[in-house]
Image: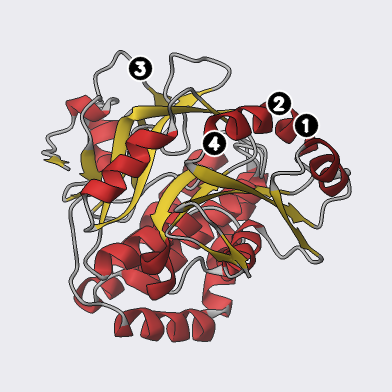
């Protein structure tokens, strides 16, 4: 067990991410001061990550995992070994900026009801654009589709300081995920069976079902390269996005909504498959089919997880749920930007 003297452990999971550590870790360490301890988790890498950290950053805590069962598993195992008040799960391909930490920390200290918070996430390669993985806070529509303030489906907005107010959201970006450690462990932590993608949304939903809030603090800004775990648009990413979305809904949704919600998702996922068919993208169609079969084949496992989640529900905080269809708004009504949606948000 690693006991952190500071309140916060910034934990970077690295699987063959040496090039990103060489590029971005110096900035993380330089910003630490006395505010946080940097921890690098070598996720059974073969690129010399461990040796690099020991040689160049002896002050950084190094955890070495001798197995690799996916992104979610790696973080879940590492956080069992770290004792701190707060964790920041920081992906290796994120660049932090000067002063990024204190606004997030101060927000968590000022709002004990918050379980997690994220910064503004911008695109590393186009630095005035919001980035796919979280943008300026995540939301969910009534059918369980995720979108962000600054990113709806594949439409990324330019950051023109239009979303500078800190608000409550439904989920926070897993790429820079500032979470209250006690709350994280109370709700069961990351689910290793997600492997990768939406595992942070699962944690956020369980936090909200335990009465916590989730926030975004845009005074803190980070930049994300993106696609370093699984490439954007790849069949593997499509598989995990579709499968994990089904798992997410099944584990956490209210019983009186679940059956018809899953039925509608089956239909809507079929429509998504038809779009790929029109493009001649058979690999993506097969990824959606595999996602559904994978979900149904492991139904007993998901059912057990649902029962465990239900035991921890105390109060369902529904802030951040968009009680309309983002599909209808985006594709039929052509509302491509978050600011165009008839959606009232709640300040922190």
Question: In front: mark 4 or mark 2?
Answer: 4
SS of the residue under disc 3: loop
- Asked if residue 175 can be seen in this view, the reply is no
In the rendered view, would you say 277 is above or below 63? above
Which mark sits nearer the N-terminus, 3 or 2? 2
Q: Marks 3/2: CA distance?
A: 24 Å
Say whether marks 2 and 1 touch (CB < 8 Å). yes
Indicate left or right for 165 with 65 as reference. left
Q: Where is residue 88? Give x, y as percent.
A: 49, 49
Question: In front: mark 1 or mark 4?
Answer: 4
Residue at x-position 56% and y-position 79%: 298
Q: Marks 3/4: CA distance?
A: 26 Å
Image disc number at residue 32: 4
Frontmost residue, 266 versus 81? 81
Say whether marks 4 and 2 touch (CB < 8 Å). no
Q: Marks 1/4: CA distance?
A: 21 Å
Which mark sits nearer the N-terminus, 4 or 2? 2
Q: Marks 2/1: CA distance?
A: 6 Å
Which mark sits nearer the N-terminus, 1 or 3? 1
Q: In which quarter of the image is the C terminus?
A: top left
Q: Where is residue 81? Give x, y as percent.
A: 62, 68
Image disc number at residue 159: 3
SS of the residue under disc 2: helix
- Its colouring scheme is secondary structure
Say whether marks 1 and 4 touch (CB < 8 Å). no
Question: In front: mark 3 or mark 2?
Answer: 2
SS of the residue under disc 1: helix
Residue named by callout 2: 23
Q: Where is residue 138? Give x, y as percent.
A: 33, 43
Residue named by callout 1: 19
Q: How many marks?
A: 4
């Amino acid at each position: 067990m690693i006991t952190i003297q500071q309140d916060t452990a910034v934990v970077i999971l690295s699987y063959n991410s040496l090039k990103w550590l060489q590029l971005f870790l110096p900035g993380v360490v330089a910003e630490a001061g006395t505010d946080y301890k940097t921890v690098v988790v070598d996720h059974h890498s073969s690129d010399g990550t461990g040796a690099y950290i020991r040689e160049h950053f002896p002050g950084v805590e190094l955890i070495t995992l001798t197995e690799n069962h996916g992104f979610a598993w790696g973080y879940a195992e590492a956080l069992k070994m770290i004792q701190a008040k707060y964790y920041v799960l920081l992906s290796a391909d994120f660049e932090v900026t000067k002063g990024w930490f204190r606004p997030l920390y101060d927000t968590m200290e000022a709002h004990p009801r918050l379980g997690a918070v994220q910064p503004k996430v911008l695109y590393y390669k186009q630095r005035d654009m919001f980035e796919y993985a979280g943008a300026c806070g995540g939301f969910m529509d009534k059918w369980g589709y995720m979108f962000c303030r600054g990113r709806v489906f594949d439409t990324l907005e330019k950051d023109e300081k239009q979303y500078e107010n800190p608000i409550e959201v439904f989920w926070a970006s897993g790429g820079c995920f500032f979470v209250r450690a006690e709350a994280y462990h109370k709700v069961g932590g990351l689910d290793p069976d997600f492997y990768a993608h939406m595992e942070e949304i699962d944690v956020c939903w369980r936090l909200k079902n335990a009465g916590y809030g989730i926030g975004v603090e845009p005074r803190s800004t980070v930049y994300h390269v993106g696609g370093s775990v699984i490439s954007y648009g790849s069949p593997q990413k499509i598989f995990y996005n579709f499968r994990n979305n089904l798992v997410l809904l099944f584990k956490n949704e209210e019983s009186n909504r679940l059956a018809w919600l899953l039925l509608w998702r089956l239909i809507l996922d079929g429509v998504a498959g038809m779009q790929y068919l029109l493009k001649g993208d058979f690999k993506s169609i097969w990824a959606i089919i595999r996602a559904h079969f994978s979900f149904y084949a492991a139904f007993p496992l998901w059912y057990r997880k649902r029962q465990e989640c239900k035991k921890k529900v105390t109060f369902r905080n529904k802030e951040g749920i968009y009680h309309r269809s983002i599909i209808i708004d985006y594709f039929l009504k052509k509302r491509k930007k978050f600011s165009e949606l008839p959606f009232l948000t709640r300040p922190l």
